[in-house]
Image (cartoon, rainbow, N blue to C red):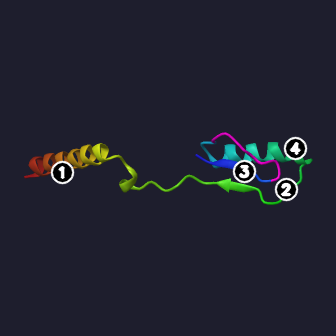
């Protein structure tokens, strides 16, 4: 999810699921608050990349066991 940040107004938009929705949010803010001008210092806040190591320990264990079970099932089916 993306967010639009206007440093002039010191506001951040609600999360937008797509770049298209974010562009609409940005343009709407520019027109309503800045007369269509681009505010200095505006930012697009991108989501952080997913990392396996950010997951809680329990989810890491469960995910690893599920992948192992799928690999074993695949090998069992092919052999």
- Majority secondary structure in the magenta region: loop
**Residues under numbered marks 2 and 4 in contact, where contact means CB atoms less than 8 Å apart:** no
- For mark 2, what is the residue? 38
Q: Residues within 10 Å of mark 4 (few under 14, many from 20)?
A: few
- For mark 4, what is the residue? 33
**Residues under numbered marks 1 and 4 in contact, where contact means CB atoms less than 8 Å apart:** no
Q: Is residue 32 magenta?
A: no
- For mark 1, what is the residue? 71
User: Alpha carbon of mark 2 to alpha carbon of mark 3: how far?
Assistant: 12 Å
Q: Which residues are magenta?
A: 8-15
Q: Which of the marked residues, 1 or 4, is nearer the chain's N terminus? A: 4
Q: Is residue 14 magenta?
A: yes
Nearer the viewer's eye, disc 1 or disc 4? 4
Q: Residues within 10 Å of mark 2 (few under 14, many from 20)?
A: some
Residue 21: x percent and y percent?
68, 43
- Label 3: which secondary element: strand
Residue 57: x percent and y percent?
30, 47
Furthest-bottom residue in this view? 41
- For mark 3, what is the residue? 5
59 sits left or right of 32 in the view = left
């Amino acid at each position: 999810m993306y967010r639009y940040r206007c440093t002039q107004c010191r506001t951040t938009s609600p999360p937008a699921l797509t770049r298209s929705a974010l562009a609409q949010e940005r343009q709407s803010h520019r027109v309503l608050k800045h007369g269509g001008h681009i505010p200095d210092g505006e930012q697009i806040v991108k989501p952080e990349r997913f990392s396996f190591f950010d997951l809680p320990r329990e989810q890491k264990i469960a995910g690893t066991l599920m992948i192992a079970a799928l690999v074993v099932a695949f090998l069992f089916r092919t052999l």
